[in-house]
Image: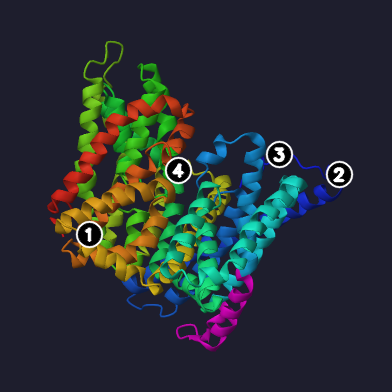
Amino acid sequence: MAATAFAPVGLPRSAARGVLARVDRAFAATIETVCAGLVVLETLILVAGIVSRYVLHNPLIWSDELAQALFIWLAMLGAVIALRRGEHMRMTTLVKMAPPGVRALLEAVAMVAAVMFLGLILAPAYDYAVDEHFMTMPGLDISNAWRAAALPAGMLLMLVAGLLRLAVVARLGTIVAAVVLIGAIAGGLVLAQPMLANLGNLNLIVFFVAIIAACVFSGVPIAFAFGLATFGYLSLTTTTPMVVMVGRMGEGLSHLILLAVPMFVFLGLLLEVTGMARRLIQFLAALLGHVRGGLSYVLIGAMYLVSGISGSKVADMAAIAPALFPEMRKRGAKPGELAALLSATGAQTETIPPSLVLITVGSVTGVSITALFTGGLMPAVVVGALVCVVVWLRYRKEDLSGVAKTPLRDTLRFSAAALPALALPFVIRFAVVEGVATATEVSTIGIVYSFIVGLLIYREFDWSRLRPILVETAALSGAILLIIGAATGMAWALTQSGFSNALAEGAAALPGGKYAFLGVSILGFILLGSVLEGIPAIVLFGPLLFPVAEQVGVHDVHYAMVIILSMGIGLFAPPFGVGYYSACAVGRIDPSEGIRPLMGYLVALVAGVLVIALVPWFSTGFL
């Protein structure tokens, strides 16, 4: 959590607190340096794998194993940075609405809850690493403990990071109050264990509904909310050893396809540093800026081109909005309308490849990444067209008397400058389709391509920004991947309880067949998207619901597009949708101004999801 979220502490600043602050900074600098090096090393290993296999026709048998082992270390150390920075995904809507004193307490509760989970899971994580000592990685011919040790090491470092942040930025009284509050809840659950033992599957509601809801709404990071609920359920209502939970978390982080997450995050940040994103916007503005609502269409088009690559909707919006909003304001656009359009555009672009949500779906459900990339194009076009209809209706009477059409010569110049950036999505898709690189490796082709464009064509690459974006890559990736690990453990616990079988039976019993199932899924994922965001919701419910979808006759790619678009609506729909507030923050707009203009776009988004649900061809026609 951010240091500014806490009230000043009462400790003497010149003594203990000053020492702890210096230790905290040194600790952070060390972890950040290691993470930056790991991102570079992972990129080089993947590039070497592509070159050796596709160019030299001599595959490196050890490259995937080494990349996978380093990836788990990168995920866990990145999670350490994210915890210290307050960048783990969490819902802060209610926290921000609370009075200052209550807000400070909730911020402390969030960190204390994270520290509590890390303390509880540390010993089982160590046992897990010890157990893995007897396994060998065949390609590298070394003990698997080198890979598994990332979990206890990362959890220990996160524990240190959490304690340091509490000591540096929180009042001692606030910390004590948070500890007492969480301790009382935990103690109450322990005392209630005999009663919980007789509840059977009603415990699922206690732990996976009530406790998760309480954690999420109080601002506890989602990964730790999942972890606490799963740990409590398994330890208080079953005889399952906690090392099994850690093993499932490690399994969730072990899918090689997830290595695409940090690589695509790195690629997305490079788009801005190399000037590619800015040139895309210049070209689109020159092409459409003189028509009614033209800059709104530019914003939609620009978000389509960059969305999903960085892994962060905030990063996508931050790359586009500052370049367009000033000119849109000059033309009379109201701030609320800008926030509404940015939110609607962010909600509709998650199916556009290469999207981390698509990669996550493929990772946790086994659906072909190539099929998801192919199937995601038309649904985005359909929903985008409906959003454009709303733009046309709102701007059909816009006064453009003071707006000059960009001369053809300048438009051609901007198009030539944007051509390398426009080619990037096609380069990535070509590499996958032609077998040059796997879905895991293809991001590195984009990274190399972006470096070449920035250094040799645009010649504006700022080397001083490289380390910060490497650290940002690690932090954002760690935040995403820790959720995937925690949600994998939680999904396993739900499966073992028999919940998945009950869910399948309930879905099969719905009147109306597959269309009723799709309708319930749309409503459910809109709600999930408003509190969990896309990736954690996918990881948690994807393995449970995709088999049900297949059972009732829904194509897996079709189902993926329906739920991804539904989650996008929830993510950007007030009052809970965190994406909407992120859009307002990026544009420096009061959230109350955008709610009314957003309603028209939400109608278009819902209509688009219904069209995609009712016409499977849009998702499967090009497979």
Please determine whether, in this image, residue 569 is positioned above or below residue 598: below
For residue 106, the mark is none
From the image, tell me which residue sits under label 1: 557
Task: Compare marks 4 and 3 and give the one earlier in the sequence.
Answer: 3
Disc 4 marks a residue whose amino acid type is Ala
Give the CA distance from mark 4 to mark 3: 28 Å
Look at 26% across and 67% down and name the residue there. 504
Camera-side residue of 195 and 402: 195
- Residue 414 showing in the rendered view: no
Query: Where does label 4 land, which residue?
Result: 315
Residue at x-position 51% and y-position 57%: 211
Give above or below for 152 relative to 549: below
Disc 4, disc 3: CB below 8 Å?
no
**Image depth: mark 3 or mark 2 in front:** 3
The amino acid type found where label 1 is placed reads: Val
Q: Is residue 345 left or right of residue 30?
A: left
* Residue on which disc 2 sits: 14
The residue under label 3 is which amino acid type?
A: Ala
Marks 3/2: CA distance?
17 Å
- Binning the other alpha carbons within 10 Å of mark 3 as few (below 14), some (14 to 19) or many (20 upward) gives some
Which is more toward the observer, 155 or 503?
A: 503
Instruction: Tell me where residue 581 appears, x and y as whole percent.
Output: 46, 36
Q: Which residues are magenta?
A: 121-146
Q: Amino acid at mark 2?
A: Ser
Q: Disc 1 versus disc 2: distance between alpha carbons?
A: 59 Å
Residue reaching furthest to the bottom: 134
